[in-house]
Image (cartoon, coloured by chain):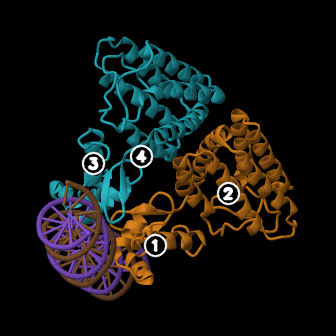
Chain colours: A orange, B cyan, C brown, D purple
Amino acid sequence: MAPIQAASLADGALSKIVEAITAGEFEPGARLSEVELARQLGISRGPLREALGRLEGSLVEHTPRVGFSVIRLTEEDLAGLLAMREGLEGMAARLAAERITPDEVAALRELLAERDTTSPGRDGYLRREMDDGFHLLVQQCARCPRIAETLRQDVYFPLQLYRFNGNARRGGTAAALQEHRAVVDALEARDAEGAEVRMREHLRNAAVCYQARSSHGGNGRLHTHMETRVT
Amino acid sequence: MAPIQAASLADGALSKIVEAITAGEFEPGARLSEVELARQLGISRGPLREALGRLEGSLVEHTPRVGFSVIRLTEEDLAGLLAMREGLEGMAARLAAERITPDEVAALRELLAERDTTSPGRDGYLRREMDDGFHLLVQQCARCPRIAETLRQDVYFPLQLYRFNGNARRGGTAAALQEHRAVVDALEARDAEGAEVRMREHLRNAAVCYQARSSHGGNGRLHTHMETRVT
DNA sequence: TTTTCGTCAACTGTTGACAGCCGACATTTT
DNA sequence: AAAATGTCGGCTGTCAACAGTTGACGAAAA
């Protein structure tokens, strides 16, 4: 039988906070009052502080004697995060090429086929979900939980706050799909070097999806009229 | 004037715990009693729990309803950490090549010269310090605090527990010095691709410095009679 | 002797409360 | 009127205590 593990209050609070922040309920820079959050979540300040502390550096920043607030990234921070992502996901693709199974290749192919058949008029959300699924699946093939966890916590979490739908170049979805296919081809051929190179190329091309909110009033949802670019 | 920042008790506890664990005062897998540690540090359990929680995943692991213990890495964990290091430090070297200043090149050259003139009979500790200095300096040139911080917290901390002095191949120090020089040459030439490739080669060669303690009684200090290999 | 069950100490998870500090508002001074 | 200062509410950092659970020890039964 599967051992039931009673999630601690801190764990529950953590997931709820992550959900709220990534959903955009708190703007970057917004103060997070401990007593207020504790009251809303129905728990004490102890577990809440533990949860907030675990999110420090990824979704939350902490100023001594002042408190927690939603993280605010500069243009340089964002560039650093994308560089980190390139290094880690590139390595994950390399490892995946060495360890992937035929079943996993088939699963990746299926994912790509699903997106291909999705009508282009659909909203970007579903496609984004599938895209995240692609990257997560590649990481799973790498058999390196540590890299996957670091990517999730330290890279994806903060990046989600600065992701916008618009894309700077036309034909973004088609290009992304093409790049994904190139990665899968390399993975299937067990070409470690090729998989890493292709994944990194793809990530550099997809970097335009992320842009720091301008500090002078911009809401970050820029170019919403443009074609959706999928990472 | 420099603003005096009264480090919180949690921060102080964190640094002390890191120091104690990396110094080898606690074996991997050793239980860390909250009340005992709090008593030794002269603080309450609250800040202590915060410090331990911040170290979870890097130096400490946590089992619900049981408590904290010093992390224990499997052979696979270790390989994953080294892969992560290769990806991140490779990217750091690439960024450093694009952003390094002549002063920083000179500082790196000086570091290498210091090591070269150090008598080979000296104990490995000083050389190790200088070597860490080399890698840290390269990361500093990358102007990406996030990558450096992730390396420090999530990679170097756990790796320090499984570092041993011995080296599997002869002439380790000379080879490492040669590899370091190749990295600096590429950095000076602003050759981003070359810097990343050389750094990754070096890290793969230096991976033999880390080895999981065997679960059946090995003390981890293997091959102490062999020549010291510097990363 | 081996297995099973009951008891208990010790520990963790959580809570509520206290003390110190920070920022804001009102007041006073120039 | 503008700047400096005193006061106060609110918040964070920390602590001690309570409740629930775990694991082990010892006793009883097969």
The image position of residue A83, as x and y in percent, is 61, 45
Identify which residue is drawn at 29% across, 33% down.
Answer: B219
**Dot 2 lies on which element?**
loop
Q: The residue under label 3 is which amino acid type?
A: Ala
Subunit of label 4: B
Q: The residue under label 2 is which amino acid type?
A: Tyr
Identify which residue is drawn at 85% across, 65% down.
Answer: A118
Q: Nearer the N terminus, badge 2 or badge 1?
A: 1
- Measure the C-alpha gap from mark 2 to mark 3: 43 Å
- Measure the C-alpha gap from mark 4 to mark 2: 26 Å
Residue B214 seen in the figure: yes
Image height of D20 relative to B139, above or below:
below
Q: Do the residues labelled 4 and 3 touch (CB within 8 Å)?
A: no
| Circle 2 or circle 3, nearest the eye | 3
Q: Do the residues labelled 2 and 3 touch (CB within 8 Å)?
A: no
B184 or B207: nearer the eye? B207
- Residue bearing the label numbered 4: B153
Residue A65, by quadrant, is bottom left
| Circle 4 or circle 2, nearest the eye | 4
- Residue bearing the label numbered 2: A210
Q: The residue under label 1 is which amino acid type?
A: Gly
- Residue bearing the label numbered 3: B30
- Measure the C-alpha gap from mark 4 to mark 1: 25 Å
The image position of residue B180, as x and y in percent, is 50, 21
